[in-house]
Image (cartoon, helix red, strand yellow):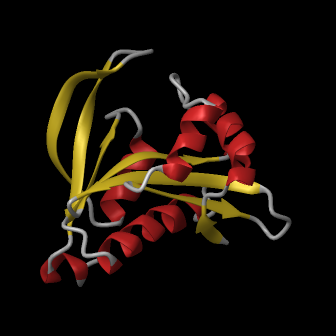
Amino acid sequence: MIKPMEERHIPAIARLEQACFAHPWSEQALRDELENEKAVFFVAEDETGRLMGYTGMHVVLGECYMDNLAVDPSFRHKGVGRALLQALIDWARKHEGVFLTLEVRPSNEIARHLYTAMGLREVGRRPRYYTDPTEDALLMTVSFDSAVSSKT
């Protein structure tokens, strides 16, 4: 089940951040997003309430910038990432978003495949964006005009 992030999710999200990212967000940074009017964060829970994954974005004047999408390793390849990304896309469309954009490592083929399948296209590159290890970032974007909306 996809639902908005709540305070009770923060410890589990912080653990997931530690497991998934070289530079994880702290519990306090995640907690700050609960009060941030520009932040939109969702979680995926299983039927027992266990966190399967989470995602979030910041929205400025209809421009949506995805921060992270993380799925617990035990729930990968089961559609959780797709459902979370779809929740962001649906929110953006409902709230008259102009586009959704994100950065992804070129080496993260699984994420790139998901993003492409969900209608995002590579529009640029940020040299040496990532560290640990150093790697460029691919900039991927989907626009929310009627032509793109009918494809996703």
Residue in view at x 35 percent, y 34 percent: 105
Residue in view at x 55 percent, y 51 percent: 34
Q: Could you say where residue 61 lies in the image, as x and y percent from the top left?
A: 20, 60
Which quarter of the rendering shows the C terminus? bottom left
Q: Nearer the viewer, residue 138 or 47?
A: 47
Q: Could you say where residue 118 lies in the image, as x and y percent from the top left?
A: 35, 66
Please count the marks in the image: 0
Residue 26 visible (yes or no)? yes
Q: Is residue 50 left or right of residue 145?
A: right
Q: Is residue 3 above or below residue 141?
A: below
Q: Could you say where residue 95 lies in the image, as x and y percent from the top left?
A: 31, 75
Q: Is residue 64 left or right of residue 27?
A: left
Which quarter of the rendering shows the N terminus? bottom right
Residue in view at x 44 percent, y 15 percent: 132
Quarter of the rendering containing residue 107: top left
Q: Is residue 46 above or below residue 136?
A: below
Q: Could you say where residue 112 lies in the image, as x and y percent from the top left?
A: 36, 48
Residue in view at x 69 percent, y 55 percent: 52
Residue 75 visible (yes or no)? no
Q: Is residue 147 left or right of residue 21?
A: left
Q: Nearer the viewer, residue 16 or 39?
A: 39
Q: Nearer the viewer, residue 38 or 119?
A: 38
Q: Is residue 48 left or right of residue 25?
A: right
